[in-house]
Image (cartoon, helix red, strand yellow):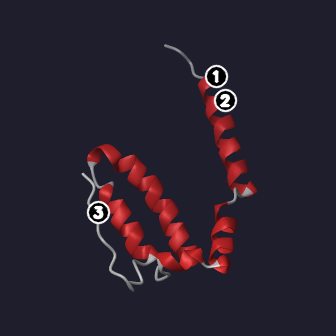
């Protein structure tokens, strides 16, 4: 069950690191272990790029939004790596010896 928290007026809000940790804590169950692992990797990279201490509210700043948008764009090197893995997997599947 989700918990809602009221933000106090004038509150700067959570940092990116705090928000990421809070979200990952909601995935701390055996049935979500894979999802948590994938999200943890992505959020770790995001914190490294934008700074774990950056406030979530600051992401509305145009410069931060531009930085976030650039980070979210697909990277050719990652897409190529994914395609190579798919080809290797297909090659392996097609060359299995049945017993």
Q: Do the residues labelled 2 and 1 touch (CB within 8 Å)?
A: yes
* Badge 2 element: helix
Observer-nearest of 3 and 89: 3
Q: Which residue is drawn at 39% across and 77% down?
A: 14
Of tags 1 and 3, the one toward the viewer is: 3
Numbered label attached to residue 91: 2
* Badge 1 element: helix
User: How much space separates mark 3 and mark 2, taking CA atoms?
Assistant: 48 Å
Q: Where is residue 94 in the image (x, y as percent from the top left)?
A: 64, 22
For residue 32, above or below residue 70: above
Q: Which residue is drawn at 58% across and 22% down?
A: 96
Q: Do the residues labelled 3 and 2 touch (CB within 8 Å)?
A: no
Residue annotated with mark 3:
4
User: How much space separates mark 2 and mark 1, taking CA atoms?
Assistant: 5 Å
Query: Mark 1 vs mark 3: which is more N-terminal?
Result: 3
Of tags 3 and 2, the one toward the viewer is: 3
Q: Where is residue 60 in the image (x, y as percent from the top left)?
A: 58, 75
For residue 70, above or below residue 11: above
Q: Where is residue 70 in the image (x, y as percent from the top left)?
A: 70, 67
In the picture as drawn, the residue positioned furthest to the right comes out as 76
Query: Mark 3 vs mark 2: which is more N-terminal?
Result: 3
Numbered label attached to residue 34: none
* Badge 3 element: loop
Numbered label attached to residue 94: 1
Q: Is residue 7 left or right of residue 51?
A: left
Q: Position of residue 47 (x, y in %)?
A: 51, 73
For residue 60, above or below residue 82: below
């Amino acid at each position: 069950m989700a918990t809602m928290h009221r933000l106090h007026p004038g509150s700067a809000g959570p940092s990116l690191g705090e928000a990421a940790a809070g979200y990952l804590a909601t995935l701390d169950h055996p049935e979500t272990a894979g999802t948590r692992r994938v999200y943890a990797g992505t959020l770790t990279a995001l914190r490294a790029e934008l700074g774990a201490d950056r406030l979530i509210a600051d992401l509305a700043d145009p410069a931060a939004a531009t930085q976030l948008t650039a980070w979210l764009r697909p990277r050719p090197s990652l897409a190529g790596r994914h395609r190579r893995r798919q080809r290797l997997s297909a090659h392996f599947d097609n060359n299995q010896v049945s017993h």
